[in-house]
Image: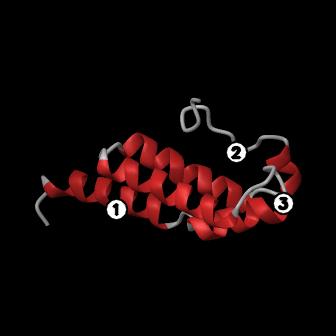
Amino acid sequence: MPTSLTPWLAAALTALVATACAPSCDSVCNKLIRCDVVDNLNPLECEESCARQDAQYELEDDKTLERAFADHRRCIGSSTCDELEDGACYEEELFQF
């Protein structure tokens, strides 16, 4: 393999692994509902909002926000309900309003 491709390939693989391991919107929303951390959370609205946010970052080609959103979903997946209630996964840059 030519050495000029090595950094590019490493970056591409890192990006793929970073987003591929994030839980699905369905999984994240089910956990949030099960943990009852958001009042009146409608499962369908949650999943649609999550999918729209994910798609928007892809469309904008914003790798920083794409990775932050994947990290956010991983955090929800790996946190306990008590940790979620305490705000363990809140990311200000993702929820600026």
Q: Which of pointers 3 and 1 indicates the residue nearer the eye? A: 3
Rendered location of residue 73, percent (x, y): 60, 56
Q: Which amino acid lies under the numbered mark 3 shown in the image of this protein?
A: Cys
The 10 Å Cα crowd at callout 1, few under 14, some 14 to 19, many 20 or more, is: few
| Circle 1 residue | 13
Point 24% across, 59% down: residue: 9
Q: Nearer the viewer, mark 3 or mark 2?
A: 3
Apparent side of residue 46 relative to residue 40 in the rendered image (left or right): left
Q: Distance between the Cα atoms at labels 1 and 2? A: 25 Å
Q: Is residue 55 left or right of residue 23?
A: left
Within 10 Å of disc 2 (Cα), the crowding (few <14, some 14-19, many 20+) is: some
Which quadrant of the rendered structure holds the N terminus? bottom left
What is the secondary structure assignment of the residue under circle 2?
loop
- Image position, residue 49 (x, y; %): 54, 55
Q: Which residue is mark 2?
A: 89
Mark 1–mark 2 CB contact (< 8 Å): no
Location of residue 41 by image quarter: bottom right
Q: Looking at the picture, which amino acid does disc 1 mark?
A: Leu
Q: Please give the residue where the numbered disc 3 appears in the rendered image.
A: 35
In what element is the residue under mark 3? helix
Image label count:
3
Compute the Cα span from label 3 to label 1.
33 Å
Give me the residue at 52% from left, 49% from top.
69
Above or below, 42 against 63 in this view is: below
